[in-house]
């Protein structure tokens, strides 16, 4: 298969990518830069953000980073968006890839303060706060594209893991994004979600999702027979960030190897 990079699909666009230090956020930041965008990534982990910047340079592209910044903290989210707008004069794309690992527990076992609340904060607040911070800059730029991340678990439960908070959080992102599409339409702001299946990232590796029986169970549910990569998800984000999707808003795009088809 011919590799289409380097490309020009995002040439001239200024993109802010949260959670750019690893996983899907890193994949989006690197691919956006390779497709011609001016990319600023932020992350709570300054070392991880630095590694993304270094990796971009090794690939012959540039990713600026702002770190450490916590997208569950209102002032950090505002400072991030304001800094990008001040430096570049516009924001055309916001990718909210920042996330905090959810607490996995059943309804009966879930502790409200220690597990439920931080999970919802790390899956919903971490989307809402950067969106709200970037919103006036998107308006001032004449519109733009917001790419949020739900999950296949917004559509299906799990008989293996306790995912009550995770499923609730990702379902909330779907509803939030549809409302953003409605509110943003008159200003030319588009908002869509990508719903990944299992993607190999440092977070899923540390959780043991790619080992032994857990790996076998995952692969049995995936018609394409493999877990995803951050780049698999990033290609969909490139489409949603580009002018190719100029009449696409309020949508959800499963990128899951076929999990939701079974």
Image (cartoon, grey):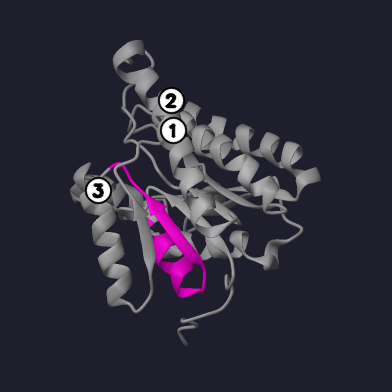
Tell me the residue that label 3 is attached to.
Answer: 46
- Whether residue 199 is visible here, answered yes or no, is no
Taking the view exactly as shown, the residue that stands out farthest to the right is 186
Q: Are marks 2 and 1 in contact (CB under 8 Å)?
A: yes
Instruction: Characterize the local packing of mark 2: few (<14), some (14-19) or many (20 or more) Cα atoms within 10 angstroms.
Output: many
Q: Secondary structure at mark 2?
A: helix
At which x and y percent is residue 233? 46, 59
Position in image of residue 170 (x %, y %): 50, 34
Of residues 113 and 260, which is closer to you in this image? 113
Residue ID at (38%, 39%): 99
**Residue 68 occupies quadrant:** top left
Comes first in the chain, label 2 or label 3: 3
Most extreme residue toward the front, as rendered?
86
Q: Which residues are magenta?
A: 26-44
State which quadrant residue 33 falls in: bottom left
Q: Is residue 76 magenta?
A: no
Image-based side of 19 in relation to 216, left or right: right
Look at the numbered disc 1 and give the secondary structure of its residue.
Answer: helix
For the question of whether residue 255 can be seen, the reply is yes
**Crowdedness near tag 3: few (<14), some (14–19) or many (≥20) residues, C-alpha within 10 Å:** some
| 3 vs 1, front mark | 3
Q: Would you say 260 lies left or right of 191 here?
A: left
For the residue labelled by badge 3, is the local secondary structure a helix, a strand or a loop? helix
The residue sitting at 40% across, 29% down in the picture is 73
Q: Which residue is mark 1?
A: 123
Above or below 209: residue 70? above
Of residues 148 and 59, which is closer to you in this image? 59
* Residue 120: assigned label: 2
């Amino acid at each position: 298969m011919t590799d289409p990079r380097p490309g020009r699909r995002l040439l001239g666009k200024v993109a802010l990518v949260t959670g750019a230090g690893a996983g899907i956020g890193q994949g989006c930041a690197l691919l956006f830069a390779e497709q011609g965008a001016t990319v600023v990534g932020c992350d709570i982990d300054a070392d991880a953000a630095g590694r993304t910047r270094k990796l971009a340079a090794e690939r012959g592209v540039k990713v600026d980073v702002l770190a450490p910044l916590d997208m569950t903290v209102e002032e950090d989210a505002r400072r991030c968006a304001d800094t990008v707008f001040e430096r570049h004069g516009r924001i055309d794309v916001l990718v909210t890839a920042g996330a905090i690992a959810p607490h996995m527990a059943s309804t009966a076992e879930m502790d409200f303060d220690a597990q439920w609340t931080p999970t919802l904060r790390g899956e919903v607040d971490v989307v809402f706060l950067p969106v709200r911070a970037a919103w006036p800059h998107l308006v001032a730029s004449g519109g733009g594209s917001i790419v949020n991340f739900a999950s296949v678990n917004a559509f299906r439960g799990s008989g293996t893991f306790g995912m009550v908070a995770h499923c609730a959080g990702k379902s909330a992102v779907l509803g939030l994004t549809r409302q953003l599409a409605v509110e943003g339409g008159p200003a030319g702001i588009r908002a869509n979600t990508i719903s990944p299946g299992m993607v190999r990232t440092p977070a899923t590796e540390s959780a043991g999702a790619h080992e032994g029986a857990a790996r076998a169970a995952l692969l049995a549910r995936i018609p394409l027979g493999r877990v995803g990569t951050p780049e698999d998800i990033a290609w969909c984000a490139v489409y949603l960030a580009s002018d190719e999707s100029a009449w696409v808003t309020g949508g959800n795009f499963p990128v899951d190897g076929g999990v939701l088809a079974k």
